[in-house]
Image (cartoon, rainbow, N blue to C red):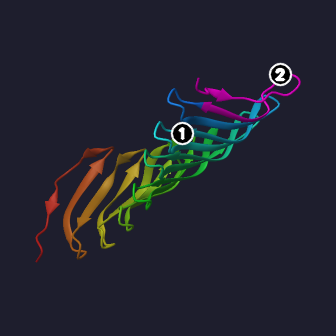
Amino acid sequence: GRIEAVNYFDSKGNLQGEKLNYSIHGILAEKADYVQGKISGMYLTYRPNGNLSRKLEVKNDEIVGILEFYDTRGNLSDQYTMKGNQKNGPYKSFHGNGALHIEATVVGDNHEGKYKEFYIEGPLYVEGEYKKGNKVGTWNFYHRNGTIAKTGSFVNGKEDGLWVEKNEEGQVTAEYTYKNGTSDGPTKYYDRN
């Protein structure tokens, strides 16, 4: 028959050392380190194709340090900082080509603080700030050449105040105003002259 799991136990019957679980096809599905019956050390899960799916560091059954998720090809897709089984600290997301996609801070399930998002080719796409999971303050959106495409403000996660759009040469192409997330007033469009 095929092996489903490999476990080691101490004299008290607690899991101790490396534990391996295999899929019904005999492919490694999970690998964990145990100390006195609790996961302590690296914990890895694998996809049916054998590629790494998730990697995290655990101490006494509590996720600490870095939690990483991988795409189906085994490329790093998301990286969280964990404290007390909660997301709490720097967060990075990656495009399929490995380039940085998002750089932020996550607390619980919310973004908190500075936020940056990048085009797949590398240039900055958007930057702003979150407070308790809501967009706040000035947000800038960029063209691929690095010039500002659009800028405006958020209050409690809703557009508020004057928003300005610009072309890649930096010329204003539109202006409009929001109040509490709703268009408030006329939209002005400008030609290239």
Q: Is residue 63 left or right of residue 130?
A: right
- Viewer-closest of 114 and 188: 114
In the image, residue 20 lies in the stretch drawn in magenta: yes
Residue drawn where x is 23% and y is 72% of the image:
168
Chain-order first, disc 2 or disc 1: 2
Majority secondary structure of the magenta segment?
loop
Q: Quadrant of residue 26?
A: top right
Q: Is residue 151 left or right of residue 93?
A: left
Q: CA distance from mark 2 to mark 1?
A: 27 Å
In this rendering, the answer to whether 12 lies above or below 150 is above
The crowd level at tag 1 (other Cα within 10 Å; few <14, some 14-19, many 20+) is many
Residue type, label 2: Gly
Q: Is residue 92 visible?
A: yes
Q: Quadrant of the C terminus?
A: bottom left
Residue type, label 1: Tyr
Residue 113 x, y percent position in the rendering: 53, 53
Q: Residue 13 bears which disc, if any? A: 2
List the residue tagged with mark 1.
46
Q: Secondary structure at mark 1?
A: strand
In this rendering, the answer to whether 95 lies above or below 170 is above
Task: Read off the magenta span.
Answer: 1-21
